[in-house]
């Protein structure tokens, strides 16, 4: 999938960064069928004075991990159908005040990806554990672990998050969601796909259009505001549980220390 939205707003100022790319043209035997040309991309960013970092993935998987203090390092494998498209598939960064952005740049001009053309970049980013992180992803899977994660906005692909600090808000259009050991309040709005939560301070599901919900080991309250379809399992809850609206599917709620409020089935 290729996104046509530009990842950079005019207000951002370009930071000087080190970028490195080695072009390799391979045969069908040497590289996967969907990668005629490939190159490694790298970027290093000093975030000593940065309060919030937004990471934007496009056209590939995104992996975010904790790394060295005061430094963000990003690496990626660019893949394209031509050398020209590969040259334009890069990792970039911008900054505005105390906020910075690391993003994938892929060709998005009219005609760039016609006639079977493609350009993708799987991105891995290591960030300081205490830096506030926001993730925006247009396609591909997202995997985040051991960071201070505040927001995820995702169009498609699965999301897996583990061992994060701080409150987390998630908006997702499609794909399965998995959250484990979230040290904060978790708020989720999801259009399709299963949602699993194992260990959080509190959970609020604003909307779940389709897919099963499984929420366990929450120390505080669980609120499910609107569930359109799919089963609901809630277990081992330290606070209250409230299901405001549930259109269809089986419901199992047990081992709740507080009160349970739910519509009749």
Image: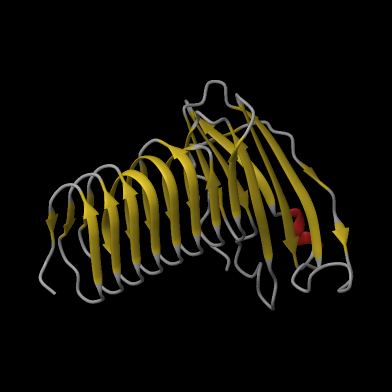
For the rendered model, the colour scheme is: secondary structure
* Vertical order, 22 against 19 (above or below): below
Expressed as whole percent of the image width and height from the top left, the position of residue 95 reads 54, 32
Expressed as whole percent of the image width and height from the top left, the position of residue 213 reads 33, 64
Expressed as whole percent of the image width and height from the top left, the position of residue 257 reads 19, 47
In depth, the one of 51 and 8 nearer the eye is 51
Most extreme residue toward the front is 255
Residue drawn at the location 23% of the way across and 62% of the way down: 253
Res. 137 visible in picture:
no
In depth, the one of 67 and 137 nearer the eye is 67
Most extreme residue toward the top is 49
Expressed as whole percent of the image width and height from the top left, the position of residue 160 reads 50, 54
Query: Is 58 situated left or right of 215 in this image?
Result: right
Q: Quadrant of the N terminus?
A: bottom right
Q: Quadrant of residue 36?
A: bottom right
Query: Is 210 situated left or right of 50 in this image?
Result: left
Residue drawn at the location 58% of the way across and 44% of the way down: 64
Residue drawn at the location 88% of the way across and 67% of the way down: 30
Q: Quadrant of residue 252?
A: bottom left
């Amino acid at each position: 999938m290729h996104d046509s939205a530009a990842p950079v707003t005019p207000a951002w100022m370009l930071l000087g960064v080190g970028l490195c790319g080695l072009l390799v043209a391979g045969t069908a035997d040497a590289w996967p069928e969907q990668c005629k040309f490939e190159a490694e991309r790298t970027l290093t960013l000093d975030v000593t004075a940065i309060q919030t970092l937004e990471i934007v993935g496009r056209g590939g998987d995104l992996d975010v991990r904790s790394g060295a203090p005061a430094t963000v390092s990003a690496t990626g494998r660019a893949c394209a159908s031509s050398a020209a498209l590969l040259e334009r598939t890069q990792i970039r960064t911008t900054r505005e005040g105390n906020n910075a952005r690391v993003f994938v740049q892929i060709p998005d001009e009219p005609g760039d990806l016609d006639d079977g053309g493609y350009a993708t970049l799987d991105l891995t980013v290591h960030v300081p554990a205490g830096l506030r992180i926001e993730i925006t992803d247009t396609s591909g899977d997202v995997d985040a672990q051991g960071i201070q994660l505040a927001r995820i906005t995702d169009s498609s692909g699965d999301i897996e998050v583990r061992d994060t600090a701080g409150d987390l808000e998630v908006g997702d259009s499609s794909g399965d969601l998995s959250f484990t050991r979230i040290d904060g309040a978790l708020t989720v709005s999801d259009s399709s796909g299963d949602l699993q939560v194992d260990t959080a301070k509190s959970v609020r599901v604003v909307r779940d259009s389709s897919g099963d919900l499984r929420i366990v080991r929450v120390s505080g309250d669980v609120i499910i505001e609107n569930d359109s379809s799919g089963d609901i399992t809630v277990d081992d809850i330290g606070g209250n549980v409230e299901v405001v609206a549930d259109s269809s599917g089986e419901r199992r709620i047990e081992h709740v220390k507080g009160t349970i409020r739910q519509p009749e089935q």
